[in-house]
Image (cartoon, rainbow, N blue to C red):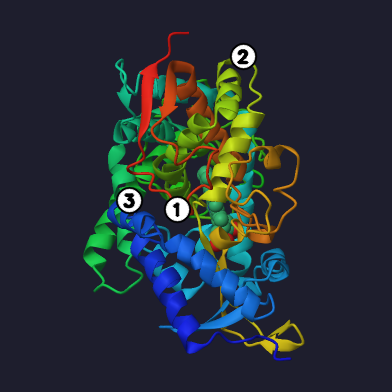
């Protein structure tokens, strides 16, 4: 038996037309609203699901080589292969594919996502230290900021949810949470982040615009460095275990050093108190780093990920909750309770990410000859993990139903077909923080407003669509009388 079966020419063509092309058109780095709308209408995701089921049946449930415009790609269709690649070493199954570099390097050339070897280990440690502490240490602060920024954000009259208005309130909140209160109105930073994402979206297929990219990156980085320097207290965060490195200390801005929020953070790993107002920048100031870490180079990914939650996750999750009365009641009472236990809201968010993953595809490249089902994958083999296809595999009994319970009873987490945050050594280090921030935003909205579904498309009476357009979702809202 050959180690990897090959898709036929027709199957490869269909895969290119139904998967690769729509993925590209929709936007790999940032969603293009018009294309997202068009593709949701055309139903390409449902067609891809059928195609992958056919490929599985025809090739005995195994992963297959599919031919694409840039050569052949190993598409992981077998759940065991997903587990093997995601659970395996990230230096063998590397995240830094050519495509990822083309897409993400305009925004974040120095980020963990694009790093290799020792630098990757170093930046992973830094990211995990900051993002791992944030959900616990900043929990109250996250709620406070969300409540302030989303107060009255949907107006005082009944109507349809104004997603753009909601996003701008939410974006102010994430600027404060990532960079501190002084960054609240520094919307130019987020504008530069999004413009750089749009540059990356072309994956090098458009003539490069190095001058524009440089200008945008300079604007973004100088803003980020200024706020990081303020959180560091102008270099306070040096000392044992904390090299000064090339990061914050090199910033030219002095920052205002304001701490108008909840006050100073606790003493950090290096035994030095960070000046900060309860932001990731404050935690970054005391996280372990070396000369390779480049803290300012990690922040664009944090802003990108948190912005993505506001633009593409909150809306569909709110619509799902509103469309399922049982979950709506539970979510509402959780939001209005004094306890910070948001188990049910968190499960709703995870389930929404299973249904419509924020990151629908995980690419990998094999860096050295690697044993594979009795054969060898040569170095340079490109791998594609279509996680949006796996998470709707009909073998999952609840594939097309909104089932938050699966996240409460452990079923979803035990299943390798369901990996909205990836898994293994490259598992998203911001998963807990992302869900905490999103749950806080939903709680702030559900405390103030009543939501009602428009139509039954996202309700329990029929299978949920394979794709949803978060930019034009309709949802009724009115101020709550309670
Ligand atoms: C709903 C929210 C989120 C989802 C669905 C998500 C999903 C993912 C996925 C799938 C990956 C792996 C990418 C790959 O393997 O190719 C990843 C990586 C990463 N995420 Fe998230 N993420 C979310 C929120 C966040 C947040 C809020 C942050 C930080 C504030 C964050 C920071 C990162 C970083 C730094 C990496 C790179 C990890 C590495 O290369 O080792 N993410 N995320």
> Looking at the image, is mark 3 or mark 2 nearer the viewer?
2
Residue 206 screen position, x and y as percent: 26, 72
Residue 467, numbered circle: 1
Q: Which label's residue is closer to the chain start, 1 or 2? A: 2
- Residue lying farthest top? 482
Q: Which mark is residue 196?
A: none
Instruction: Give the residue furthest to the bottom.
Output: 1
Identify the element where label 3 is drawn: helix
Q: CA distance from mark 3 to mark 2?
A: 36 Å
Disc 2, SS: loop
Residue 302 seen anywhere in this rendered image of the structure: yes
Comparing 199 with 16, the one in front is: 16
Q: Nearer the viewer, mark 3 or mark 1?
A: 1
The residue where tag 2 is placed is: 338
Is 324 on the left-hand or right-hand side of 416? left
Residue 361 lies, in percent from the top left, at 52, 63
Question: Does 228 sit above or below residue 250?
Answer: above
Q: Foreground residue, 402 or 432?
A: 402
Is 213 on the left or on the right of 175, as rendered? Answer: left
Give the secondary structure at mark 1.
Answer: loop
Label 3 and label 1: CA atoms lie apart by 23 Å
Q: Quadrant of residue 63?
A: bottom right
Q: Which residue extends farthest front?
A: 461
Q: Residues within 10 Å of mark 3 (few under 14, many from 20)?
A: many
Determine if the C-beta at disc 1 is less than 8 A from ligand 1: no
Write down the residue under mark 3: 194
Cβ of mark 3 under 8 Å from ligand 1: the answer is: no
Kindly check if marks 3 and 1 are in contact, taking CB atoms under 8 A apart as contact.
no
Give the percent coordinates (x, y) of residue 369. 67, 86
Q: Residue at x 57, y 22 (%)?
A: 329
Q: Quadrant of the N terminus?
A: bottom right
Q: Total marks drawn? A: 3
């Amino acid at each position: 038996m050959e180690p990897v079966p090959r898709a036929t020419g027709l199957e490869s063509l269909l895969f290119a037309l139904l998967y690769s092309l729509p993925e590209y058109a929709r936007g790999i780095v940032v969603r293009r609203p018009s294309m997202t709308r068009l593709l949701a209408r055309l139903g390409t995701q449902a067609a891809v699901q059928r195609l992958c089921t056919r490929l599985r049946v025809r090739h005995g449930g195994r992963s297959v080589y599919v031919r694409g415009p840039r050569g052949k790609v190993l598409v992981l269709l077998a759940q065991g292969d997903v587990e093997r690649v995601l659970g395996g070493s990230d230096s063998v199954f590397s995240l830094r594919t050519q495509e990822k570099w083309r897409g993400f390097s305009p925004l974040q050339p120095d980020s963990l996502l694009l790093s290799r070897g020792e630098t990757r280990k170093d930046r992973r440690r830094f990211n995990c230290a900051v993002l791992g502490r944030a959900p616990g240490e900043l929990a109250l602060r996250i709620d406070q900021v969300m409540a302030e920024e989303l107060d009255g954000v949907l107006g005082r009259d009944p109507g349809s949810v104004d997603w753009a208005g909601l996003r701008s309130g939410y974006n102010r909140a994430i600027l404060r949470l990532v960079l501190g209160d002084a960054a609240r109105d520094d919307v130019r930073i987020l504008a530069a982040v999004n413009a750089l994402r749009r540059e990356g979206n072309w994956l090098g297929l458009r003539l490069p615009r190095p001058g524009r990219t440089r200008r945008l990156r300079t604007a973004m980085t100088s803003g980020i460095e200024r706020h990081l320097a303020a959180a560091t207290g102008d270099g306070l965060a040096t000392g044992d275990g904390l090299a000064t490195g090339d990061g914050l200390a090199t910033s030219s801005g002095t920052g205002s050093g304001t701490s108008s929020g909840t006050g100073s953070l606790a003493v950090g790993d290096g035994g030095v108190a960070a000046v900060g107002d309860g932001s990731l920048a404050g935690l970054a100031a005391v996280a372990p780093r070396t000369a390779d870490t480049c803290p300012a180079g990690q922040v664009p990914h944090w802003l990108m990920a948190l912005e993505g939650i506001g633009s593409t996750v909150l809306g569909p999750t709110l619509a799902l909750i509103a469309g399922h009365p049982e979950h709506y009641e539970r979510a509402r009472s959780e939001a209005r309770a004094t306890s910070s236990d948001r188990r049910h809201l968190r499960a709703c968010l995870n389930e929404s990410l299973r249904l419509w993953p924020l990151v629908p595809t995980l690419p990998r490249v094999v860096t050295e000859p690697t044993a594979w089902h009795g054969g060898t994958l040569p170095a340079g083999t490109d791998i594609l993990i279509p996680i949006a296809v796996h998470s709707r595999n009909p073998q999952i009994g609840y594939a097309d139903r909104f089932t938050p319970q699966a996240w409460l009873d452990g079923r979803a987490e035990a299943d390798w077909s369901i990996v909205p945050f990836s898994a293994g050594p490259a598992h998203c280090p911001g998963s807990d923080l992302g869900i905490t921030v999103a749950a806080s935003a939903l709680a702030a909205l559900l405390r103030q407003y009543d939501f009602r579904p428009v139509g039954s498309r996202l309700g329990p009476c029929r299978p949920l669509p394979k794709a949803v357009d978060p930019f034009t979702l309709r949802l009724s809202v009115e101020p709550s009388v309670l």
